[in-house]
Image (cartoon, rainbow, N blue to C red):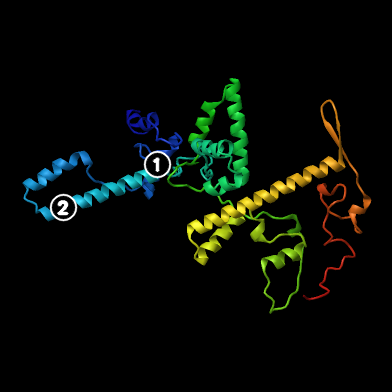
């Protein structure tokens, strides 16, 4: 019993910072099992700056040449600098303790993905709510998905509203859960990407079966593939969440300077904001002219004139009533021509 108290019990009394406090993470002597498999972080053994004057005086008394003393001093300074950089990198890295960070002790095969740290969530909310930055720019700057940025802003707004109203927050539960999971930290000097932000989502028009014959001499591009699925489908380069990153990379490969790329991107952002505002104004004018609003006690009822001709000849028009609920594909319907009839 006393051996366990001096070994594993002592480690459980003073747990490893940033990791879960599980008995199975240690052996009988109190050593981490992951360290025994070679997972221990390497360290640099070098004397501190407080001990440096004493060592220099000892070298001088031992008769070490001045050039050798200068070389040894420069080496120790480089080692101390390297050690400080390693410690700073370890402090900023996500706290993934391998065998220790597991939300479910009885499931050793589960490894949780990193979550946003409290500091990073606060910074995202400050950028969007206080500085007025758009969520697309914030997503690209911090390496966080656009949908996650929007969710963080909404939840942080609710949290701050509850604090203003005097409601109690479950901070102990929040801190306990965060202590069990790896976190993506926030650092003003070095941004750590949280996740992939430019994943291409599956468009409903691309889910149907398609066989498109084409000549071997034709240069088939992504735009051609998009038009084959649907005449209104954009190519993959334009459907990703951050198409501006592709443009910036192409300009970088063309040899444009960083300042020129930033200026051109700012001009494109201003033009996109102008077009978006113009579209919103056009939509507002249309609703004011075509839609009748009847105010109720709890809801407002909107009435709009609908024409049956909007459904088109096949009844599958995009402006038809009920199109928002989806339409079935015709590729497996009886009587449909499924073989190509021409080659472009």
| Residue at image mark 1 | 91
Q: Is residue 92 visible?
A: yes
Residue 32 placement (x, y as % from top left) = 38, 41
Quadrant location, the N terminus: top left
Nearer the observer, disc 1 or disc 2? 2
**Up/down of 97 relative to 233, above or below:** above
Q: Note whether 231 is above or below 93 in the view shown.
A: below
Q: Percent x, y for residue 180?
A: 49, 36
User: Where does residue 318 sit, x and y in percent of width and height?
Assistant: 83, 53
| Front residue of 337 and 300 | 300
Quarter of the figure that contains the C terminus: bottom right
- What number is the disc on residue 108? none
**In the rendering, at what x and y percent does residue 314 appear?**
90, 58
Residue 224 as seen in the image, left or right of residue 110 = right
Q: CA–CA distance between discs 1 and 2?
A: 32 Å
At a point 43% along the width and 34% down the height, the residue shown is 23
**Which residue lies at the image location 58% right of the left edge and 51% below the top edge?**
197
Local packing at callout 2 (Cα closer than 10 Å; few below 14, some 14-19, many 20+) is few
Q: Is residue 104 left or right of residue 237?
A: left
Would you identify the image quadrant in which residue 243 lies?
bottom right
Q: Is residue 216 left or right of residue 17?
A: right
Q: Residue at x 60, y 44 (%)?
A: 135
Front residue of this view, candidates 179 and 294: 294
Within-10-Å neighbours for mark 1: few <14, some 14–19, many 20+: few
Residue for badge 2: 70
- Outermost residue, bottom direction? 217
Residue 44 appears in the rendering: no
Up-down: is 259 above or below 5? below
């Amino acid at each position: 019993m006393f051996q366990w108290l001096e070994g594993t019990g002592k480690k459980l009394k003073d747990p490893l910072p940033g990791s879960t406090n599980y008995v199975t993470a240690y052996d009988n002597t109190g050593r981490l099992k992951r360290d025994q498999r070679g997972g221990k972080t390497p360290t640099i053994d070098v004397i501190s700056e407080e001990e440096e004057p004493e060592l220099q005086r000892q070298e001088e008394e031992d008769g070490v040449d001045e050039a050798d003393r200068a070389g040894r001093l420069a080496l120790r300074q480089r080692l101390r600098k390297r050690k400080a950089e390693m410690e700073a990198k370890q402090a900023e890295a996500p706290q993934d303790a391998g065998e220790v960070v597991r939300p479910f002790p009885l499931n050793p095969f589960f490894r949780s993905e990193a979550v946003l740290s409290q500091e990073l969530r606060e910074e995202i909310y400050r950028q969007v709510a206080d500085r007025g930055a758009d969520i697309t720019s914030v997503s690209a700057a911090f390496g966080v998905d656009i949908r996650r940025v929007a969710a963080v802003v909404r939840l942080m707004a609710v949290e701050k509203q509850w604090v203003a109203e005097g409601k109690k927050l479950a901070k102990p539960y929040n801190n306990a859960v965060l202590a069990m999971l790896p976190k993506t930290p926030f650092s003003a000097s070095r941004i750590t990407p949280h996740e992939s932000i430019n994943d291409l989502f599956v468009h409903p028009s691309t889910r149907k079966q398609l066989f498109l014959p084409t000549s071997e001499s034709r240069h088939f591009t992504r735009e051609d593939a998009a038009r084959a699925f649907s005449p209104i489908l954009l190519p993959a380069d334009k459907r990703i969440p951050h198409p501006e990153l592709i443009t910036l990379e192409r300009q970088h490969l063309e040899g444009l300077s960083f300042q020129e790329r930033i200026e051109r991107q700012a001009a494109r952002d201003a033009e996109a904001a102008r077009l978006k505002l113009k579209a919103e104004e056009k939509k507002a004018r249309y609703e004011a002219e075509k839609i009748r609003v009847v105010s109720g006690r709890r809801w407002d009822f909107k009435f709009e004139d609908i024409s049956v001709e909007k459904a088109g000849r096949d009844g599958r028009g995009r402006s038809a009533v009920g199109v928002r609920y989806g339409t079935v594909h015709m590729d497996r319907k009886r009587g449909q021509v499924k073989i190509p009839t021409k080659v472009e």
